[in-house]
């Protein structure tokens, strides 16, 4: 290199600053504007993730090639920002390393680099480059105070204080040994399982319908009564409820656990734990599926891919199967989320293996394999029992489309192809006995198909496909000819006959709801932990009342049994008694 270039003895010039300011503005716009554009967060999530790092790279090019900095400044500035970034990332919380470096740390430093360059543009070279680097280093150092708990529903990182309690790392009650269960209490659990009011994910039919009485609509004058609230382990599992017992799955440090809680007090009745931990940067740690209560037992599927039958009275393991061995695959990107389906003395679950190891059925009593069929390799949906044209059927939605099978033999009755390159994480919605809705995230929307029978096989025709209901990973609710759900980021209603939108209003993040069918009400647990009661009205969005139930990011499905409401997230759970209408 020419020594004269390094010495740069010529009189220095003020920095050419406008390109850096333009790039800094682009970084800020890409980072903060998409969440305010309807649907942009889910459809164009890559803009705030990748465009700021591209603009940051262009800013480095500006510094070296177009800033008018001296040669020495260029070398010090270029390598100085990279060394500072490396040291800060190494000192950061582990959750702040990786993708979030390009999403937050580097763009933050480069915006500060541009601002520092603006304020120091006319100073002497040996002063301004040091000051510019100091601006950038101080800005990036702010990330040392943070921890990332995954993403929010609008695809922003969920940033928390580095020293706050992380999901799945502590704060729950002391473990209760399964062997301490009294025989009388075990008998109560066994009896309750036989008539479970909410036996699994989204209730008895996975449709999210609560057989509850009409609720009072003024929770200010007549507030919900808190029965209990307590810390719980991480995870996105919901509750299954039988009598006075509630079952869920959690991540407690290095262990995946299944917990039976006393519904009245929140005390642990028993826990079953195994050493395993699934964690990924976007969804965080913990189980994703919900226990299923059937055949006198509790069936669970872990995020790592272990299917278990547990004794309902004690939590003791009766049998288990590991998909890593059976299906010869590792967990999907966001972990196994499929909740077990128990029907016809079989337990059916998505395994996602190659060939015929996609959807698998096991003897509910012994765990022996009964049948397995091919299906799409990626799904966060759960097998669902429904009546199709009056016949028993299992429905499974994957990235390849919809499978309808005979539950006893596993014979495929319909393989409806609607391939999607992303993920499907929702349940098919069955209307009557011949119409099925296929929800798909991002920009694909929802499709309605009509099922008909030809001989022993089923066939399907498309009725409509609408992009006015793009539910991402929030479930749909069908009621009296209309479909309710989150379209992008807003609550919406569409006509089931046409797929046309009736209205779109109300923000609940990526919240989940249940239908109170008898009273035409929808109860929603918003992503913020706020619980709202809505009128299921196709003419307009009508929020009747609401209250703050729990704190923190809440993607877990609420459960309503009678007027008892169970809500949880990756940090706490609570049970409320909701006021009834007079």
Image (cartoon, grey):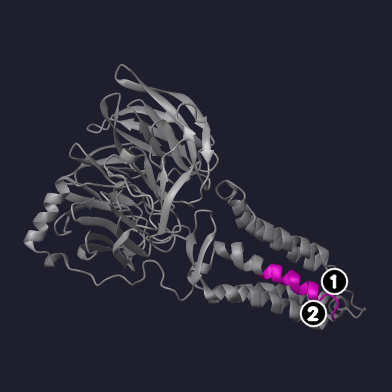
Residue sitting nearer the eye, 58 or 182: 182
Q: Write down the residue under mark 1.
A: 15
Give x and y (percent) for residue 80.
Answer: 70, 76
Residue lying at the far right of the rendered structure: 10
Marks 1 and 2, how far apart at CA: 10 Å
Using residue 83 as the reference point, say whether residue 508 is left or right of it: left
Q: Tell me if label 1 and label 2 are in contact, CB under 8 Å.
A: yes
Residue 83 on the magenta segment: no
Instruction: Work out whether 86 lies above or below 582.
Output: below
Mark count: 2
Which residues, given as a range, are shown in magenta? 109-123
Secondary structure of residue under mark 1: loop
Using residue 117 as the reference point, say whether residue 147 is left or right of it: left
Q: Write down the residue under mark 2.
A: 128
Task: Give residue 202's quadrant in the image.
Answer: top left
Give x and y (percent) for residue 511.
Answer: 44, 51
Residue sitting nearer the eye, 490 or 472: 490
The dominant secondary structure in magenta is helix
**Can residue 385 be seen?**
yes
Q: Earlier in the sequence, mark 1 or mark 2?
A: 1
Secondary structure of residue under mark 2: helix
């Amino acid at each position: 290199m020419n020594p004269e270039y390094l010495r740069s003895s010529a009189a220095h010039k003020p920095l050419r600053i406008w390109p850096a300011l333009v790039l800094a503005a682009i970084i800020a716009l890409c980072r903060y504007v998409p969440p305010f554009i309807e649907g942009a967060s889910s459809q164009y999530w890559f803009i705030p993730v990748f465009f700021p790092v591209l603009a940051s790279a262009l800013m480095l090019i500006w510094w070296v090639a177009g800033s008018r900095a001296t040669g020495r400044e260029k070398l010090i500035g270029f390598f100085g920002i990279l060394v500072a970034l490396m040291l800060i990332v190494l000192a950061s919380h582990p959750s702040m390393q990786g993708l979030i470096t390009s999403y937050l740390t580097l763009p933050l430093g480069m915006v500060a680099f541009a601002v520092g360059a603006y304020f120091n543009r006319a100073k002497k070279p040996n002063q301004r480059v040091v000051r510019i680097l100091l601006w950038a280093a101080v800005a990036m150092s702010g990330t040392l105070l943070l921890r990332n708990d995954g993403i929010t529903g609008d695809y922003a990182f969920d940033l928390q204080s580095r020293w706050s309690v992380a999901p799945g790392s502590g704060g729950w009650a002391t473990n209760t040994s399964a062997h301490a269960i009294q025989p009388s209490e075990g008998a109560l659990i066994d009896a309750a399982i036989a008539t479970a009011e909410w036996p699994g994910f989204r209730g008895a039919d996975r449709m999210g319908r609560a057989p509850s009485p009409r609720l009072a609509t003024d929770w200010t004058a007549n507030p919900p009564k808190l029965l209990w609230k307590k810390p719980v382990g991480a995870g996105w599992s919901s509750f299954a409820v039988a009598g006075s017992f509630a079952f869920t799955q959690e991540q407690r440090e290095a262990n995946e656990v299944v917990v039976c809680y006393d519904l009245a007090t929140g005390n642990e009745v028993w826990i079953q734990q195994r050493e395993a931990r699934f964690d990924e940067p976007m969804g965080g740690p913990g189980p994703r599926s919900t226990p299923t209560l059937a055949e006198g037992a509790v069936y669970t599927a872990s995020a790592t891919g272990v299917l278990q039958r547990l004794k309902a009275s004690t939590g003791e393991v009766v049998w288990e199967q590991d998909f890593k061995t059976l299906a010869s695959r590792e967990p999907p990107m966001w972990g196994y989320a499929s909740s077990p389906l128990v029907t016809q003395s079989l337990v059916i679950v998505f395994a996602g293996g190659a060939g015929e190891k996609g959807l698998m059925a096991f003897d509910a009593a012994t765990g022996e394999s009964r049948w397995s069929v091919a299906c799409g390799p990626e799904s966060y949906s759960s097998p669902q029992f429904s009546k199709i044209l009056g016949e028993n059927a299992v429905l499974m939605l994957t990235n390849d489309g919809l499978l309808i099978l005979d539950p006893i033999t596993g014979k495929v009755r319909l393989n409806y192809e609607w391939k999607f390159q992303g993920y499907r994480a929702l349940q098919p919605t069955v209307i009557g006995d011949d119409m099925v809705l296929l929800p798909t995230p991002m920009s694909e929307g929802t499709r309605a198909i009509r099922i008909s029978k030809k001989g022993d096989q089923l066939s399907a025709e498309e009725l409509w496909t609408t992009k006015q209901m793009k539910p991402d990973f929030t479930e749909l609710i069908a009621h009296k000819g209309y479909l309710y759900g989150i379209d992008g980021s807003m609550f919406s209603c569409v006509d089931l006959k046409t797929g046309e939108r009736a209205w779109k209003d109300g923000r609940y993040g990526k919240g989940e709801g249940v239908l109170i069918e008898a009273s035409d009400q929808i109860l929603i647990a918003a992503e913020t932990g706020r619980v709202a009661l809505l009128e299921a009205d196709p003419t307009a969005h009508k929020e009747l009342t609401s209250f703050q139930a729990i704190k923190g990011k809440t993607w877990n499905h609420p459960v309503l049994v009678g007027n008892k409401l169970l809500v949880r997230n990756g940090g706490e759970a609570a049970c409320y008694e909701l006021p009834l209408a007079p």
